[in-house]
Amino acid sequence: MGLATGVGMSAEPAPASKPVMFSGKIESVRMADDLVVFAGAGGNVAVWFDAGRMLMIDAGIPHRSAELIGLVTKLAPDAKSKTLFNTHWHFDHTGGNAAFVAAGFTTVGTAACRQRLGETINLADLGMTVEPTPETARPVVAFEEKLTLFAGAEPVRLIKFPASHTDTDAVAYFEKRNLLHTGDLLVSGGYPVIDRATGGSLDGMIAATKLLRTVGDEKTTIIPGHGPVGDRAMIQTQLDLLNLVRDRLAPLAEKKMTLDEVSKLAPLADLDDKWGRGFLRSPVFTRMAYGQWVK
């Protein structure tokens, strides 16, 4: 999730609440003749297509929907079969659902994703409340653990992960081209969000990051939830960060320090030069990560 703090969000945020970080140009990266990644409209959006079919992973934020639909439609103007997979419930990945449903897409996601999109959720760490998404914009095809879609004849395995970033996350693995879209289970170049309002935890993220290494192999291409496309080295990079964070915070938890006491110590402040260049800096990330020890 890449969201501005201190702002109330709903399915259709007011103009003043639009995240600044998603107001620039939408960039495209051609991964293959039939696969493009769009960045800048929310989380990274991947689109596979041929003349008559399209499979899209994530939908960006609401106010970039029209522009994103225009870019996606140009890839396959005559496509009749159009599927949209939501990697998780956060609005920078599902905010465009309503517009894409209106454009003829069928939405797919975990059962937990569908449920969370129907709830009012207080994201206290980010200072915002997210209102329910209209029922018509929630996934109409829901799965519990695994589901296989097809990009043409190529299997695309959707795999639900245990609670970590949220309790709704799933990845998409293109088997033949050895390509993995991780959603926000992996973020390149910044602190990952740990959404403790919907089941996220530091230990869960550590476990999920380790589990990502079991999908594909050493040559797998990775599309993270945010940041540039890369290789499996970014998985280890995130794991190293999360382990370092735990090593610093766990001793404070053993001393039964409160969240406010830990925040005043600023135990992760020195990490900001490298990791605070995304939409989170250490004060908010510290609260997210330490939250698992706070009842």
Image: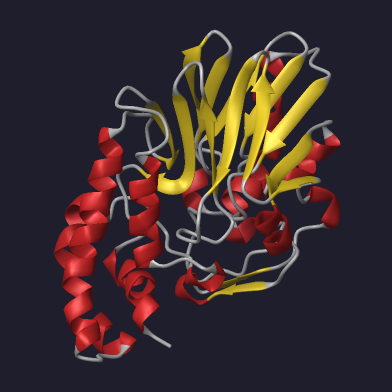
Question: Is 292 placed left or right of 135 in the picture?
Answer: left
141 or 91: nearer the viewer: 141
Q: Where is the C terminus found, in terms of image quarters?
A: bottom left
Give the residue displayed 70% in from the left and 35% down from the top.
84
| Percent position of residue 139, x then y | 76, 47
- Could you say which quadrant of the image residue 164 lies in? bottom left
| Percent position of residue 186, x then y | 39, 46
- Could you say which quadrant of the image residue 46 lies in? top right
- Look at the image and tell me whether residue 26 can be seen: no
174 or 6: nearer the viewer: 174
Which residue is outermost to the left? 270
- Look at the image and tell me whether residue 200 can be seen: yes
Give the residue displayed 51% in from the left and 37% down from the top.
44
Q: How many marks?
A: 0
182 or 145: nearer the viewer: 145
| Percent position of residue 88, x then y | 59, 51
Image height of 44 relative to 155, above or below: below
Give the residue displayed 50% in from the left and 61% down from the top.
163
Give the residue displayed 59% in from the left and 60% down from the top.
17
Q: How was this image coloured? A: secondary structure
Image height of 246 relative to 177, above or below: below
Image height of 257 relative to 244, above or below: below
| Percent position of residue 42, x then y | 54, 44
Question: Is 90 placed left or right of 292 in the picture?
Answer: right
